[in-house]
């Protein structure tokens, strides 16, 4: 979702820099980039390691960080070029679709308010799995819920952790990097934008 469907990584970055700065941490855009695609529980541990002892608990930090991001996502989201059009084309072609995100369900629900009703058959949120990306569990759970073989799935990702999760699950991965560099690899297509993609071009990858 973040960085693939919507351009929310910059929202995350703004919230991180402002909130951590208020807690005495110098946190940069480069620091934010290191966490792109990370499981939120892992991100909290990284943030807490930089905050002076006693300033805030991990639970308080997570609640404040998540609340600020959710409020921003409810107000407005910016969809990535071609993302909504591809999603609509996949729905029209009756291609089963799942949204697999490291973000928690409350954040996903905020983004979905900006889309037509029921754009996905299955949603797997970061707080609904034991092991987050880069572990394959989120994508394996989504494929199982769709009733499909992961090897017959195409995963679309913008981060290295997400790409690794899709590959580990056995799927073909289309990488659309925005903030980070994603290398070429077998059963992986790296593209600059979602705009040229279509249901037919994605099916062709699996032939």
Image (spheres, rainbow, N blue to C red):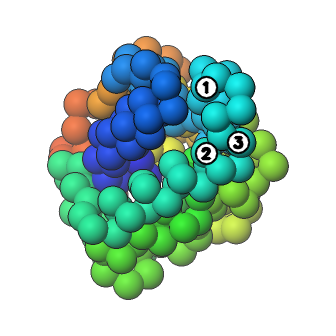
Residue drawn at (70%, 42%), measured in percent from left and top? 58
Question: Considering depth in this image, is 120 or 26 the residue closer to the camera?
Answer: 26
Q: Residue 58 carries which label?
A: 3
Q: Earlier in the sequence, mark 2 or mark 1?
A: 1
Residue 166 against residue 82 in the figure, above or below: above
- Callouts 2 and 1 close, C-beta under 8 Å: yes
Q: Where is residue 115 in the image (x, y as percent from the top left)?
A: 31, 74
Using the image, tell me which numbered label, if any, was put on residue 128.
none
Above or below — where is 163 with respect to 186?
below
Residue at mark 1: 51
The answer to which of 18 and 94 lies nearer the viewer is 18
Q: Is mark 2 on a helix, strand or loop?
A: helix
Q: Mark 2 points at which residue?
A: 61
Q: Which of 1 and 77 is in front in this view?
A: 77
Q: Earlier in the sequence, mark 1 or mark 3?
A: 1
Task: Report how far apart the C-alphas of labels 2 and 1 lie in the structure.
Answer: 10 Å
Q: Dot 3, how many residues are within 10 Å of its Cα: few (below 14), some (14-19), or many (20+)?
A: some
Q: How far apart are marks 1 and 3 (CA)?
A: 10 Å
């Amino acid at each position: 979702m973040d960085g693939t469907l919507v351009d929310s990584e910059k929202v995350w970055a703004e919230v991180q820099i402002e909130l951590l700065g208020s807690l005495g941490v110098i946190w940069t855009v480069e620091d934010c980039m290191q966490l792109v695609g990370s499981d939120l529980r892992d991100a909290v541990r990284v943030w807490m390691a930089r905050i002076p002892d006693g300033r805030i608990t991990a639970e308080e930090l997570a609640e404040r960080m998540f609340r600020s991001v959710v409020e921003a996502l409810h107000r407005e989201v910016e969809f990535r070029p071609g993302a909504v059009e591809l999603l609509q084309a996949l729905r029209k072609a009756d291609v089963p679709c799942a949204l697999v995100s490291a973000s928690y369900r409350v954040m996903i629900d905020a983004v979905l308010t900006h889309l037509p009703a029921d754009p996905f058959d299955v949603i797997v949120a970061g707080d609904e799995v034991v092991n987050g990306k880069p572990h394959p569990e989120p994508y394996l759970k989504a494929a199982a819920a769709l009733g499909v073989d992961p090897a017959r799935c195409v995963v679309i990702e913008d981060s290295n952790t997400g790409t690794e999760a899709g590959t580990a699950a056995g799927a073909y991965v289309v990488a659309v990097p925005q903030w980070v560099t994603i290398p070429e690899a077998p059963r992986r297509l790296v593209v600059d934008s979602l705009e040229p993609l279509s249901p037919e071009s994605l099916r062709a990858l699996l032939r």
